[in-house]
Structure formats: C-alpha cells, structure tokens
C-alpha cells in the first residue's frame, strides 16, 4: 500500500509525507514477515515505533523499541516514538514524541480522548526529557480537536480511527 500511496502522491503533486506503522528491530536480512528500515525508506519518510497496541499485542519491550529506533535512524527515517505516560524513558533518536495513553486507545481502552489539562501536564514532564516536538494520540476526532489548541508545546496529533473516515479526517485537518 505504501508504494501505491507514494505513486499517487507523486503523480498528483500532493504535499504529504508517508509513514509506516512499524519497523523490524533487525537490520536487513532474512527475517520472514519483518519489514526493514531500507524497505520502508523506499516508500515512506516516517515510522511509528512503540505504539501501545504493539506493546500489548506483540509484547514489545523497551529494548526492542530502542533497537527499532536505531534501525529507523540508520535508514534515514523520521521516528515517531509513542510513549504511554510521562514516566517512560525517551529513546535517543526520536524525532517526534507521541503521548498516547492506553486508556484513550479504542482497541483496548475506553476510547475517550485524554483531558487537555492532563495532556498539558504530561507534556511539561516530557519536555524536560527531550527537545523533540510533542504530539498527542488517543481518540481525537473532529468534535474535540479544538479542545487541544490551548495545550502548551503541542505540535500536532497522531490520529487513529478517525483517520479511516475521509470526511472526519478532513474536518480534523481543517480545524487544526
């Protein structure tokens, strides 16, 4: 799908960057089912690492996440590092940090966006750990996007389910 998306973006001159949802922790080689950094770099600029779903369903550990960041950086990818709370350590090499509390992820949480005041509080702590831009991910949709405009240090969003509905996603982009 990334190759097709890249072709459409280039053909129509669309000003967007593409990203992958995961990356192998291994350098290039025979790792059946894994997608390496160089493979992703052919079609995308970004990669999400450490998403709550990967941690929960695939048992990803901090060590694996650090290895994935290293592979991504070696391939020249921009890393979006997901953290679940302010106590998590920040892996060196993260270009963007996405705070995504598991309770706000609809696949296993209540699927309710975090209170903007709590996002601000967490961002204050994360800013002491890294200079990387901070984004919020966790059930943000067109109905509540405006609530986050007052959050200090917010640089954007990691949109989940709402990105699957074109009209909703478009509304989020326009509102921001």
Image (cartoon, rainbow, N blue to C red):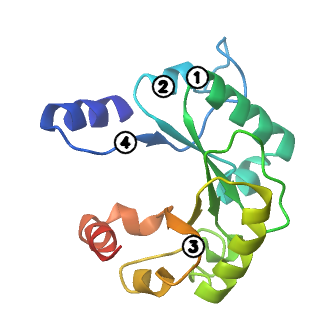
Residue picked out by circle 3: 106
Residue picked out by circle 2: 41
Residue at image coords 78%, 45%: 91
Q: Quadrant of the N terminus?
A: top left
Q: Along the polypeptide, which appears first: circle 4 or circle 3?
A: 4
Query: Tag 1's secondary structure?
Result: helix
Residue picked out by circle 4: 17
Residue at image coords 66%, 71%: 108
Reply above or below: 107 against 3: below
Q: Which of marks 4 and 3 is in front?
A: 4
Residue 8: x and y in percent read 20, 36
Tell whether 139 sits left or right of 58: left
| Nearer to me, 35 or 27 | 27
| Nearer to me, 68 or 76 | 76
Q: Along the polypeptide, which appears first: circle 1 or circle 3?
A: 1
Query: Tag 3's secondary structure?
Result: loop
Residue neighbourhood size for the residue with mark 4, other residues' Cα within 10 Å, grouped as few (<14), some (14–19), many (≥20) = few
Residue at image coords 31%, 45%: 16
Reply above or below: 55 against 137: above
């Amino acid at each position: 799908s990334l190759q097709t998306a890249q072709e459409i973006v280039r053909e129509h001159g669309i000003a967007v960057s593409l990203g992958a949802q995961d990356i192998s922790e291994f350098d290039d080689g025979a790792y059946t089912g894994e997608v390496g950094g160089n493979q992703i770099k052919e079609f995308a600029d970004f990669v999400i690492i450490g998403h709550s779903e990967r941690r929960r369903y695939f048992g990803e550990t901090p060590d694996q996440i650090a290895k994935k960041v290293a592979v991504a950086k070696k391939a020249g990818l921009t890393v979006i590092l997901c953290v679940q709370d302010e106590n998590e350590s920040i892996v060196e090499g993260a270009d963007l940090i996405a705070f995504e509390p598991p309770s706000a992820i609809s696949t296993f949480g209540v699927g309710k966006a975090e209170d903007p005041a709590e996002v601000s509080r967490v961002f204050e702590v994360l800013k002491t750990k890294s200079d990387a831009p901070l984004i919020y991910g966790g059930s943000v949709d067109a109905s509540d996007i405006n609530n986050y405009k007052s959050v200090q240090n917010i640089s954007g969003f990691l949109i989940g389910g709402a990105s699957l509905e074109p009209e909703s996603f478009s509304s989020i982009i326009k509102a921001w």
